[in-house]
Image (cartoon, grey):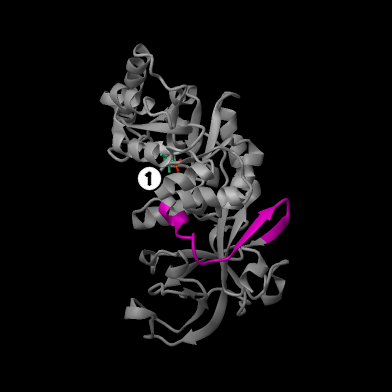
Amino acid sequence: MLSWDDTPSVSAMRCSRAWVEIDLDAVHHNVRQFRRLLRPATDLMAVVKADAYGHGAVAIAQTVIAAGATWLGVATVPEGIELRQAGLNAPILVMGALHHAEEVRALARWQLQPTIVTPKQALVFADALSDACLPLPVHIKLDTGMSRLGFDWQRAVEFIEFVDRLPALQITNLYSHFATADELDDREMWRQHERFESAIATLKSHNQLPPRLHLANTAATLSNADALQYDMVRVGLGIYGLAPAPHLKSILNLQPALEVKARITHIKQIPAGAGVSYGHRFVAKCPMTIAVVGIGYADGIPRQLSNQLTVLIGDQRISQIGSITMDQLMLDVSDVNDLAEGDIVTLLGHSNSHQITADDWADRIGTISWEILCGFKHRLPRIMKRNNSQQLYPAEDSLL
Ligand SMILES: *Cc1c(COP(=O)(O)O)cnc(C)c1O
């Protein structure tokens, strides 16, 4: 078992408590898997919003581009700027809606591409960019049944004719987004798909069809061969190595890229009848040995997993007990031999014979793996692993 001194090549101080390990080789592998489903001419957009679903946007973006992704997708302008500042020059789509002239000008300055969803928003863009010498490439989004961002698909012609009259904007792409592509019952997905096709047909007959089309997220890329015929797919979850639903697991061989590890900071015996953690939601039935681990809900471990979490120590599955607290949680280690303070616990990840994934947590508490992964956006340092080497992010000196 690893002890305090064995943390390979990374700062013992930074990783004294808990950290995330990102396997960039797994991300590379996952991108290659998705590329195999696509025709060579089809663009693969890697969706790296929310700091690449908690994996670290810059390192993930560099990895996916090297692996064959050709576009990057983000939700906000600052997310796009972060990638540009890191030197990424692939086309970047901002999928959220923008309404402020300031944001629009920043977007244009950093050569990001916006999603336009209403005529009013198009006018804000046209106004903010009235001095620009080149038109800004824009993606028009239609609402085909998600009822989130997008203009009514039945009025696509009217909308596109409106935007087309604004010289500051050049419509390059038309897209929509599925609400239920991960469901076993695919009827609603196909209803949305037919609406998209119907809008395409009408636009074509008015000679207003944008040159490029895209529709599929991860789930549709895995389940809807027709959506692969458009010009691009937008894959998020899949590049991080998770399938959107159990029935979509066997289509590609995906490898989860994110592992979460923490150290045991304290080991002690407690007597029968002792309550453990806030609210004493666990009470020892007999004398036991418990271990305190330096990770908690502020680090991304959902508190709802209290008393339900299983972790790995070596190759052994161990139960977590009592309420998970902000920075710490407790384990029942009565059956573990040779345990020492400083030993490493794996919360998400694998050992020789076990694997614990974000899906396992999500299933247990009634959420989705996307939300679990995004929980690791903020607090823990990340160790980026590639070709058997590793690097700490953010770099050491940025903290000193
Ligand atoms: C987040 C997002 C995606 C990626 O979704 P996954 O299910 O993670 O593949 C694709 N398209 C849009 C518009 C999104 O907002």
Q: Is residue 6 shown in magenta? A: no
Q: Tell me if residue 74 can be seen.
A: no
- Dot 1: element: loop
Q: In the image, ligand 1 is in what quadrant?
A: top left
Quadrant where the N terminus sits is: bottom right
Which residue sits furthest front? 131
Tell me the residue at 54%/82% (across/down): 267
Say if 176 sits above or below 306 in the image: above
Residue 309, compared with residue 181, is above or below; it is below
Q: Position of residue 188 (x, y in %)?
A: 30, 30
What kind of residue is marked 1?
Leu
Hey, which quadrant is residue 15 in on the image?
A: bottom right
170, 68: nearer the viewer: 170
**In the depicted view, which residue is nearer to us: 238 or 201?**
201
Which residue is located at x 30 percent, y 34 percent? 119
Q: Residue reaching furthest top? A: 205
Pointer 1 residue: 98
Classify residue 271 by image quadrant: bottom left
- x, y (%) of residue 223? 44, 30
Q: Which residues are magenta?
A: 371-391
Q: Quick one: quadrant of the C terminus?
A: bottom right
Residue 205: horizontal and vertical position, in percent? Answer: 35, 12
